[in-house]
Image: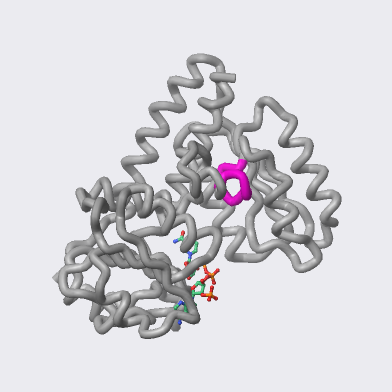
Amino acid sequence: MAEIIDGKKISAQIKEEVKEEAAKLKKDGITVTLAVIQVGQDPASSVYVGNKKKACEYVGFRSLAYELPQETSQEELLNLIGDLNGRADVNGILVQLPLPGHISEEKVIQAISPDKDVDGFHVQNAGRLTVGMEGFVSCTPAGIIELLKRTGIGICGKECVVIGRSNIVGKPMAALLLRENGTVTVCHSRTKNLAEITARADILVAALGKPKFVTAKYVKEGAVVIDVGIHRGENNKLCGDVDFDSVAEKASYITPVPGGVGPMTIAMLMVNCLQSAKMGKKG
Ligand code: NAP
């Protein structure tokens, strides 16, 4: 039976570390500040935004909440981002996705200053990751690397398979595993013989967005299985992309849903905000 990787516990440790650092910055007169923009009132987005505000409060950051109506124009949103880009007291800017259909997510993401792009979605930060330069890294994959490291799971030389190639999870995940000297394969919806490839993995990351898709046949005996998916099933119960019960029988380590990757995303957002404030301090 697999050992559970406790994302709740590890994310709590990280938040404590951030809290200490934030208190030190406060002594130097710097209050780390994150601006969070939400357009419309999508209920899931409201929950995510609420959790981000709570995390800011907990670690001693200031959060500025911009709750804009659904009919906000792209121009209005871009103007707000422009203002926030210019404010020295704002360290991080986050626009909660998805945006209403009349607004281009790409234009909005690229309008955020790369120095305040604490989500790590700007093309400059994605490029920096690819060529091995410092920059903000997308929070979910960054959190997965922390989960592995803090659980004592080595990545160097391991066969790593990532299912999914999105810009926010799959691709940065692959780049980070490569940076850690894993041997990385990326699978997607056109991949042939998926189970044959995933069954080679020492570390398997499932980020395909299909509830309980990854069953035991996709997993090698003793593999480490990281479940990125979040789905709300019947009776409002959360599940991931991995069929936890069957896979836990075969894996050596597994992340649960909830309580695995999810809490790490917000913890890493706090880490990125702190990093931004420290960069600002250096000037
Ligand atoms: P996405 O943009 O929908 O990307 C899904 C990826 O999976 C695509 O690359 C797609 O391939 C691939 N895929 C879909 N079906 C497949 C199949 N049958 N076999 C192999 N590959 C397949 O999703 P995402 O934004 O990366 O998110 C993935 C999951 O993680 C979702 O459940 C999401 O809710 C969750 N998530 C969780 C967190 C967290 O904090 N825990 C954060 C972000 C996302 P193509 O490219 O060929 O279409």
Can you give x and y, in whole percent of width and height, for residue 65 in the image? 67, 44
Residue under the point 21% across and 74% down: 220
Q: Is residue 83 left or right of residue 37?
A: right
Can you give x and y, in whole percent of width and height, for residue 230 in the image? 45, 69
Q: Nearer the viewer, residue 36 or 84?
A: 84
Q: Is residue 1 left or right of residue 43?
A: left
Looking at this view, name the residue that lies furthest to the left.
Answer: 1
Examine the image and state in which quarter residue 212 appears.
bottom left
- Residues in magenta, as a range: 117-125
Q: Nearer the viewer, residue 36 or 119?
A: 119
Magenta span includes 34: no
Which quadrant, please, contains the N terminus? bottom left
Magenta span includes 118: yes
Residue under the point 65% across and 63% down: 98
Q: Nearer the viewer, residue 28 or 281?
A: 281
Can you give x and y, in whole percent of width and height, for residue 190 in the image? 49, 81
Q: Is residue 212 above or below residue 111?
A: below
Residue under the point 79% across and 50% down: 77
Q: Is residue 280 above or below residue 1?
A: above
Is residue 244 in view?
A: yes
Instruction: Label the magenta part by its dominant secondary structure.
Output: loop
Query: What is the tally of numbered marks visible in this picture?
Result: 0
Q: Is residue 53 left or right of residue 65?
A: left
Which quadrant, please, contains the C terminus? top right
How is the model colour-coded?
one colour
Can you give x and y, in whole percent of width and height, for residue 269 in the image? 49, 44
